[in-house]
Image (tube, grey):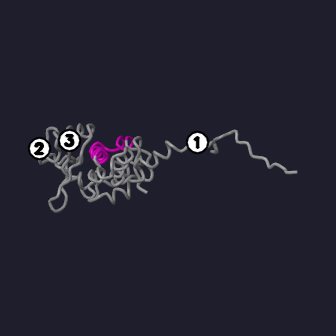
Amino acid sequence: MVRYLNADEASRLVRACPEDFRKMVQAALFTGCRYSELSRLKCTHFNSDSGTLVIRLAKGRIRHVVLTDEAKASFAHWTKDKSPVDHVFLRADGRVWGISHQKRPLGEASERAGILPAVNFHILRHTHGSHLAMSGVPMGVVAAQLGHADTRMTEKHYAHLAPSYVAQTIRANFPNLGIGDAIATVVPLRRIKRA
């Protein structure tokens, strides 16, 4: 089963992060991007007009990640007064985020936020995908946002969270039989003796 953070956990985690790393965590929750995608993201990859990020993939391919209004405002703030070739996210010492630089601050922030076991960066990605699925976003759209080649991987991880037409129809139409354990006044049937 895919682990994801609820809104309260995500908020606590963000508040528990050091300022430089907080932006990376916010961006991951906003976009579902991988750590490696965010760590190499340049300001030119943010398009404020369309509210998207261009994520450069292997072999010259690209993926467009759609931003919510909240995410778009955050990226506009993070890229303000920067050159198009500057990295969006830098460490407090001004250097780029390296391959495993996320592990320690994420573990420490998880502990401060009271989230155990500690969150890894992939859980932030799963949080984005899970909340999209739970909001009824079609699996094809979730797949495109996360950069999955097709919906098979998306369905494997998120379909069980999606509101289902079948489930909604059954719940809306099956009658209440009055036999649940929550009913306090259930009277047992007595056997009638025949003469």
Residue 106 % position (x, y) = 35, 51
Q: Main secondary structure of the magenta part?
A: helix
Residue 104 % position (x, y) = 34, 53
The image quarter in which residue 136 lies: top left
Q: Which residue is mark 1?
A: 176
Q: Which residue is mark 2?
A: 83
Residue 9 % position (x, y) = 41, 44
How far is mark 2 from mark 1, CA to CA?
Answer: 63 Å
Pick whichever, 114 or 129, lies toward us.
Answer: 129
Q: Which residue is mark 3?
A: 51
How far is mark 3 from mark 2, CA to CA?
Answer: 18 Å
Q: Residue at position x 11%, y 45% from top?
A: 84
Q: Residues within 10 Å of mark 1 (few under 14, many from 20)?
A: few
Q: Amino acid at mark 1?
A: Asn
The answer to which of marks 3 and 2 sits earlier in the sequence is: 3
> Mark 2: which secondary structure?
loop
How far is mark 3 from mark 1, CA to CA?
Answer: 46 Å
> Mark 1: which secondary structure?
loop
Q: Which quadrant, please, contains the N terminus?
A: bottom left
- Residue 16 inside the magenta-drawn segment: yes
Nearest to viewer (mark 3 / mark 1): 1
Pick whichever, 150 or 96, lies toward us.
Answer: 150
Q: Residue at position x 22%, y 41% from top?
A: 75
Q: Residues within 10 Å of mark 2 (few under 14, many from 20)?
A: few
The answer to which of marks 3 and 1 sits earlier in the sequence is: 3
